[in-house]
Amino acid sequence: MTVQELYTELGGNYDDIMRRLRSERIARKFLLRFLEDKTFETLQQAVENGQQEEAFRAAHTLKGLSLNMGFPQLLDSSQKLTESVRTELTPEAASLLQTVAADYARTVEAIQALDAE
């Protein structure tokens, strides 16, 4: 999969990413680094363990990563989760985490297909 195909599959804006990062080589580098990031794992553990502050911090970080990397679905779901856990772990957080998990898995799968080239 090419970088452009990846962004098409994820509903992202390839042209915007190219304007910001200037080359597919740099975009590929940051995409592969996304796979190494542990923020999602931290988020899962924090929600499961009832750690509101850590859950908020991780959700907010994932939201920022998604914005910077141009992943609109993951951005949307992580933004909703961020707001849900901003001041307390609401009952809705577990449900929202499932949506984030699905969007995260889809993003990771697309990046791994890119890596397979």
Image: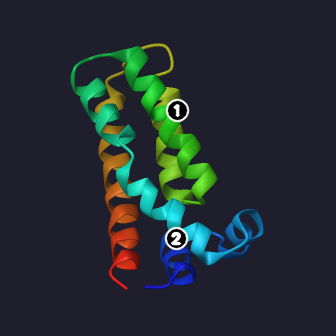
- Between 102 and 7, the residue placed more toward the observer is 7
Image point (35%, 30%), residue name: 93
Residue denoted by label 2: 28
Q: On the rendered structure, is 16 left or right of 66? A: right
At a point 54% along the width and 42% down the height, the residue shown is 63
The circle on residue 6 is: none
Which sits earlier in the primary sequence, circle 1 or circle 2?
Answer: 2
Q: What residue type is labelled 2?
A: Arg
Asked if the residue at tag 2 contacts the one at tag 1, i.e. Cβ–Cβ closer than 8 Å, the answer is: no
**Residue 56 place in picture, x, y as percent:** 46, 24
Camera-side residue: 98 or 42? 42
Residue at point 71% right, 72% down? 18
Location of residue 91 with respect to 42 vertically, above or below = above
1 vs 2, front mark: 2
Disc 1 is placed on an element classified as: helix
In the rendered image, the quadrant that contains the N terminus is bottom left
Q: How crowded is mark 2: few (under 14 residues within 10 Å), some or many (20 or more)?
A: some
Q: In the rendered view, would you say 45 is above or below 38? A: above
Query: In percent of the image, x 61 and y 50: which residue is there?
Result: 67
Taking 36 as reference, is 22 left or right?
Answer: right
Q: Residue 60 carries which label?
A: 1
- Identify the image quadrant of the C terminus: bottom left
Q: Where is residue 25 in the image (x, y as percent from the top left)?
A: 58, 74
Disc 1 crowd rating (10 Å Cα; few below 14, some 14-19, many 20+) is many
Q: Position of residue 110 (x, y in %)?
A: 39, 72
Q: In this view, does 77 lie to the left or right of 16?
A: left
Q: How far apart are marks 1 and 2 (CA)?
A: 23 Å
Q: Is residue 11 visible?
A: no
Q: What is the three-letter code of the residue carrying label 1?
A: His
Residue 53 quadrant = top left
Tell me residue 99's x, y (percent): 35, 49
The secondary structure type at the circle numbered 2 is helix
